[in-house]
Image (spheres, rainbow, N blue to C red):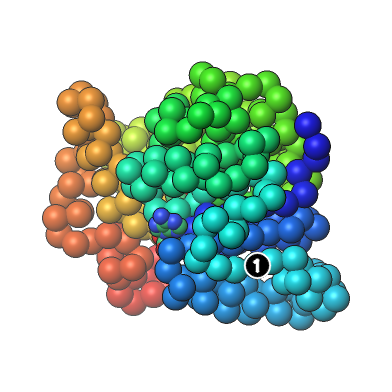
Amino acid sequence: MADITKVLVVGSGAMGAQIAMVCSLAGLEVAVQDVAEASLERAREELTQRMQRSVDKGRITAEERDASFTRMRFGTDLAEAAKGVDIAIEAAVEKIDVKRSLFADLDRLTPEHAILATNSSSFVPSKIADATTRPDRVVGMHFFNPALVMKCVEVVRGPQTSDETAAMTVALVERLGKTAVVVDKEIPGFIANRLLNAVRDEAIRLLEGGYASVESIDTAARTALGYPMGPFELMDLTGIDIGYHTKQARFEETGHPADAPSRSVVDKVERGELGRKTGKGWYDYTNEGNH
Ligand SMILES: NC(=O)c1ccc[n+]([C@@H]2O[C@H](COP(=O)([O-])OP(=O)(O)OC[C@H]3O[C@@H](n4cnc5c(N)ncnc54)[C@H](O)[C@@H]3O)[C@@H](O)[C@H]2O)c1
């Protein structure tokens, strides 16, 4: 199979825009497609500003920046964007029906050899692969936010993902200057988020059991384990409701009490104390500097 030179990124939101930029900075031709013209506009503006900052800081030259934008095309027409691509990276909204219908379209519109990758955080490849006639070329390609900065990309193999697809995806990740982490057997949450969630859940258990305070647990994570921030500080940064909704969805799927959101998290969500964005979460941010 030929090398990957042309990429389609579907969805130009928080993830798609930066994934597209990462690809074009690595010298690849990139078509960025979104159903919303406004989202494409916003992506173009944000990337222009970001790249200007990179030039100002001397991380890239103005010529490299200009050449990168020349390699990018933005548009709403999926058929046009899919022409001649070697891989499609889907970063559209996290709804299974949307993804399955997109993958059926991508199967129809991209060249036969193209790999169809999903950046989904919660759907494993097998939930999507059977919407296509090429399940062997469907793979998870899970970037972390912000994609321009974060090194890790999880390459998630579904039961039908071929060795060649996995190897080509890993090679692409490396070409992008990122570190590929292969998930040999798909599992919801993949690796990094499962590790993160395990630490978060244990932190909540310690708190609810009265073993230690929020501050003590965060301090232990930072000073003993070398974490850049403690689990409660991180929940406040990302939004306590995000973890709540993920757990609630999992609980509705499995009915297993261990999957349900914890009492103290439910309490926070009901009170609207969702973290930094509401001024209060595990910590109080109303007078920044309190904490
Ligand atoms: N935000 C994160 O931290 C993060 C991290 C890793 C992976 N992800 C995954 O990335 C994907 C996108 O997340 P996001 O945070 O960028 O979302 P977002 O809401 O910022 O962007 C989603 C984009 O998809 C577009 N879209 C919706 N339906 C579409 C369709 N049918 N065709 C083309 N575009 C369509 C929307 O217009 C929007 O621009 C999700 O699958 C999510 O699980 C998100």
Residue at the spot x=27%, y=60% of the render?
Answer: 274
Percent position (x, y) of residue 126?
A: 44, 27
Percent position (x, y) of residue 146?
A: 57, 58
Q: Is residue 171 visible?
A: yes
Q: Quadrant of the C terminus?
A: bottom left
Mark 1 CB near ligand 1 (8 Å cut): no
Q: Nearer the viewer, residue 121 or 110?
A: 110
SS type, badge 1: strand
Label 1: which residue?
A: 73
- At label 1, the amino acid type is Arg
Q: Is residue 123 above or below residue 286?
A: above
Residue at the spot x=66%, y=28% of the render?
Answer: 166
Residue at the spot x=36%, y=48% of the render?
Answer: 98
Q: Is residue 53 above or below residue 165?
A: below
Q: Is residue 152 visible?
A: no
Q: Nearer the viewer, residue 256 or 18?
A: 18
Q: Quadrant of ligand 1?
A: bottom left
Position of 272 with respect to 203 (left or right) is left
Residue at the spot x=35%, y=42% of the render?
Answer: 96
Percent position (x, y) of residue 218?
A: 43, 47
User: Count of labels shown?
Assistant: 1
Specify the quadrant of the image occupied by residue 18: bottom right
Q: Nearer the viewer, residue 206 or 23?
A: 23
Position of 19 with respect to 78 (left or right) is right
Position of 113 with respect to 124 (left or right) is right
Q: Quadrant of the N terminus?
A: top right
Categorize mark 1 by other alpha carbons within 10 Å: few (<14), some (14-19), many (20+): some
Q: Nearer the viewer, residue 110 or 99?
A: 110
Percent position (x, y) of residue 223?
A: 55, 45
